[in-house]
Image (cartoon, rainbow, N blue to C red):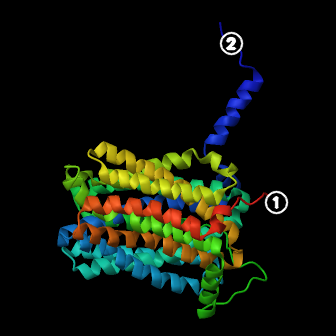
Amino acid sequence: MAVNEGPGLSERRTTARRRLTIDLTPLRVSRDFRLVWFGLLITSAGSQFTLVAVFVQVKELTGSAAAVGATGLAYVAGLVVGTLAGGAVLDAWDRRRLLMFAQVGLAAGSTILLGGALAGDPPLWLVYAGIAVLAAASAIDGPTRSAMTARLLGAPLMPAAQALNQVVWNTSAMLGPAAAGLVVARWGVTVAYAVDLASIGCMFVAAALLHPMPPLAGDHRDTGLSAIREGFSFARRNRLIMSTFAIDLIAMVFGLPRALFPFLIVEQFERAPEAIGLLFAAPAVGALLGALTSGWTGRIRRQGLAVILSVAGWGMAIAAFGWAGTLWFGLAMLAVAGWADVISAIFRVTIMQTAAPDRLRGRLFGIHILVVTGGPRLGDVEAGLVARLVSPTFSVVSGGIACVIGAGLVALAYPELRRARAAQPS
């Protein structure tokens, strides 16, 4: 006999599902957010092709883990230049035009890499130059998009918006490397670079369709060195914002061994080089699951504590990956790390969005991008050097343990982060 659940039980189950699943409200309420979100989905997937292609190309050119890790230095150098240049104008110019300009810069970097690949075996400096140009442009692209979000949606929707952005990045990171690994193995790095260039064109079109977003009336419109100084000065004085930078830098420098993937897949896991995409994709699988089931994050009040615990969880999972004796256990640990990372990212960016005034938001997110994007590149350098001095396995395990210790030290040094709570709806 069928049992009628009744409206009360049915409603409770529906409410429970809504609390767990991702909140799509930002996509429903803002046309411009939808445009940026779908454009980001395409261009993020394309960037994964370049990420894999660069690592594989440098490994083939040099056979050196240190040279692969040094791609991180090239990226950080470009990122610093782009952050300083962007800091001079990010909050003074129309953000729609800035986003379009950033796509032109990204296309220039991608063209350098594509041109070198078409020419045959390019000199190593040319590959590093292409990486640096991409990094400089990304230092304008990322902060501009992030600064737009709060204006488009408001503080209460920030966790939902960040979860949706994490879906984009991690869907791309999950599918892009796997596809890129196959493309590079079959057709070479040239096709991979061409895919990235085409994806940048899609984001340019999305940016062109946005409404103008000039600075708010009455906001200070300094440019040049005074604008750069103001942004860095505010970040330095705001200990809550500084704490989010510090804990993420620790996690990314010590706990992201991407530069070792081309070596680990062959030496530790005894698989063909074509399987490298699995290692790149595994963290994104866990992160995507975390983002898709992130409805609960909007109800967490102790956001700073959630960041600390998530970073510690990331470090423990990375250390377990280093100890993995089988590929499948290693992939599972990378997925757990990805889940922890996406939860940390949702809360860190939400804290940033609500703690930063709009007139400074572009510059502060420029510094944020320098940390979250430059950190993994410094991590490439750290992982490559430690692997060369000791071994790839030691590099991964010690890095994961350093993340856990670092999260604890940040929690002690910054009580502001421990006490950080969600903003109340207005």
Report the quarter where the N terminus lies: top right
Tell me which residue sits at (25%, 73%) in the image.
66
Tell me which residue sits at (30%, 63%) in the image.
395
Estimate the x, y position of residue 315 in percent, counting from the top left. Answer: 43, 57
Mark yes or no: residue 47 visible. Answer: no
- Per the image, the residue denoted by label 1 is 426
Considering the numbered disc 1 on the image, is that residue within a helix, a strand or a loop?
Answer: loop
Marks 2 and 1, how far apart in space? 43 Å
Earlier in the chain: of badge 2 and badge 1, it is 2
Tell me which residue sits at (70%, 61%) in the image.
153
Estimate the x, y position of residue 391 in percent, counting from the top left. Answer: 23, 63
Q: Residues within 10 Å of mark 2 (few under 14, many from 20)?
A: few
Residue furthest right in the image: 426
Specify the amino acid type for callout 2. Answer: Val
Q: Quadrant of residue 425?
A: bottom right
Judge by depth and name the residue closer to the eye, 133 or 71.
71
Estimate the x, y position of residue 415 in percent, counting from the top left. Answer: 64, 67
Q: Quadrant of residue 71?
A: bottom left
Where 204 falls versus 79 (above or below)? Answer: above
Mark yes or no: residue 320 visible. Answer: yes
Considering the numbered disc 2 on the image, is that residue within a helix, a strand or a loop?
Answer: loop
Estimate the x, y position of residue 134 in percent, counting from the top left. Answer: 41, 75
Tag shown at residue 3? 2
Tell me which residue sits at (58%, 62%) in the image.
36
Judge by depth and name the residue closer to the eye, 95 or 384.
384
Judge by depth and name the residue closer to the eye, 99 or 236.
236
Specify the amino acid type for callout 1. Answer: Ser
Is 174 positioned to the left or the right of 296 in the image?
A: left
